[in-house]
Amino acid sequence: MKALLPGTTPRTARFGLWQRRSLRWQVMAAVVAINLCAALVAVVVIIANARRATETEILSSLAVAERFVQETVERLASADGAAGSLTQLPLHISGLRHVRIRIEDRAGNAVDIAPADDEEEGSEGEVPPWFARLVTVERQEMVIPIVENGAAVGQVRVAGEASDEIAEVWEDMSDLALLAIAVNIAILAALYIVLGRLLMPLRTLSAGLHELEAGRFEHRLSPPRVRELALIADRFNALGVALKAAGDDNARLNERLVSVQDDERRQIASDLHDELGPCVFGLRANLESIDRLAARAEPTLAQRMGERIATMTDILDRIQGLNRRLLRKIRPMALGHVPLAAVIADLVADFESHSPGRRVALATEGLAERYGDSVDITIYRCIQEAVTNALRHGGARNIAITLRGARLEGRLDLIIEDDGSGIAAGAPRGFGLIGMEERIGALGGVWRILPATPSGTRIEVSIPAHPCEFGLSAAPERLAAQ
């Protein structure tokens, strides 16, 4: 026996099992239960009526038989000197229904009597014992004396017998039960078909809701013939239209946010490169000039100035290194100026140089030189985030990156697979993965994370993309179209 869940009683478990059944099954089960209850009530009523009818029939038959036997005994006793009536009586009183007659002599011995037709048929053997016990009434018996020449020579016992009436009731009940079963089967079959036709729109509605859940808001339902279900279908279609409009607005908003974000990052990167870079270069040139001037000063002052210059040079080196890292993090300056494959290759080489003993393989196929700022930076960020997670959190030793451009289909396919420890079940997604999902979704792409074989993680990304010429940005084109 299966163990119940904590807090679950057998009653709630049975209720839950009932609720999980289909509506058609529940209706059919309810109809069958109602029919069984009706059949039980009908059996009780039939048995009660049969008992009353049997009792009435037995009493009536017993009264008729008593009168008939009494008249026959008196007639035989008064004829031909009233001799031999005991031997002649069985020939005159046989064949009575619903009674059993026993002729006894003075000593109580039975005198043979011809069996009735219903006894010869043995109809009682066809009735189930349980039914006979339910319908059988109390046995009634009468004794009629046989008198010849004023002396009693024997007696006739007339007893009511309900087996004949019970057999008739059982036969009628069996025929009625067969007819009821046939009618109920026909009704259930018709109900099954009708419920199937009525519930078909609900199954169609369920499939439509699944389409909406999958994000296919353009799905529409055909209005069914049932008016109430047609109203539901109309509301579903109106909901689909509203969700489609909201989804389109949200997609345009996300795309605009990504484009604005990329423009801001490009502007910040440009400022860092064009403003901070020359300032650092100017400071370095001035420090070199001061260093040359310090060489002409007296030795003690020259030594102290040299120490300060060396310290400032170290600070400038750190600022310059920080500036490069910020530029790479915000937006690689090479994007939009060199082919995308070269930028990705430089990123892969940088990972290998900073991760000794790790191997990052890159395979590209059918790539255009660029696909616009938004697409290029998204591909760059996806590779950067996935490889960083594989190296830092997954402990991967080998990472394979495959980037394919499908010009005819107008999309880019990216696959990143590693042999690390993979993502733990139920682990929350970090901000990096969330950012990837938002950028990919804003561009109308799809992605998924799968376990790799035999271990590790596999990330698949597909983004709609069309080649762009250098000097043109996809973001301004989309913004102008909006």
Image (cartoon, rainbow, N blue to C red):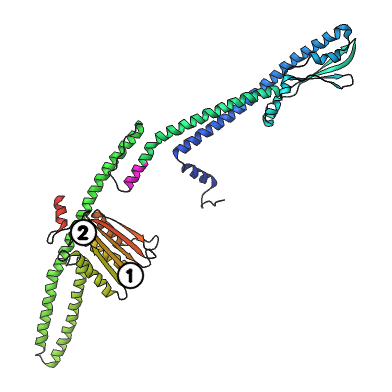
Q: Using the rendered image of the protein, determine whether residue 213 is visible from the camera's viewpoint.
A: yes
**Crowding at label 2, few (<14), some or many (≥20) Cα neighbours within 10 Å?**
many
**x and y, in percent, of residue 34 in the image:** 53, 32
Secondary structure beneath dot 1 equals strand
Residue 209 in magenta? yes
> Does residue 291 sit above or below 74 in this rendering?
below
**x and y, in percent, of residue 344 in the image:** 22, 67
Q: Quadrant of residue 144?
A: top right
Q: Residue at x 32, y 37 (%)?
A: 233
Going by the image, does 231 lie left or right of 336? right
Q: Quadrant of residue 353?
A: bottom left
Choose the circle earlier in sequence order: 2 or 1.
2
Most common secondary structure along the magenta stretch? helix
The residue labelled by disc 2 is 375
Secondary structure beneath dot 2 equals helix
**x and y, in percent, of residue 265 in the image:** 18, 63
Which contiguous range is marked in magenta?
Answer: 206-217
The residue labelled by disc 1 is 398
- Residue nearer the viewer, 256 or 80: 80
**What is the three-letter code of the residue carrying label 1?**
Asn
Q: Quadrant of residue 114?
A: top right
The answer to the question of whether label 2 and label 1 lie on touching residues, with beta carbons closer than 8 A, is no
**What is the three-letter code of the residue carrying label 2?**
Val
**x and y, in percent, of residue 465 in the image:** 21, 56
Residue 13 in magenta? no
**Crowding at label 1, few (<14), some or many (≥20) Cα neighbours within 10 Å?**
some
Spatial CA span between label 2 and label 1: 26 Å
Q: Using the rendered image of the protein, determine whether residue 45 is visible from the camera's viewpoint.
A: no
Going by the image, does 398 lie left or right of 409? right
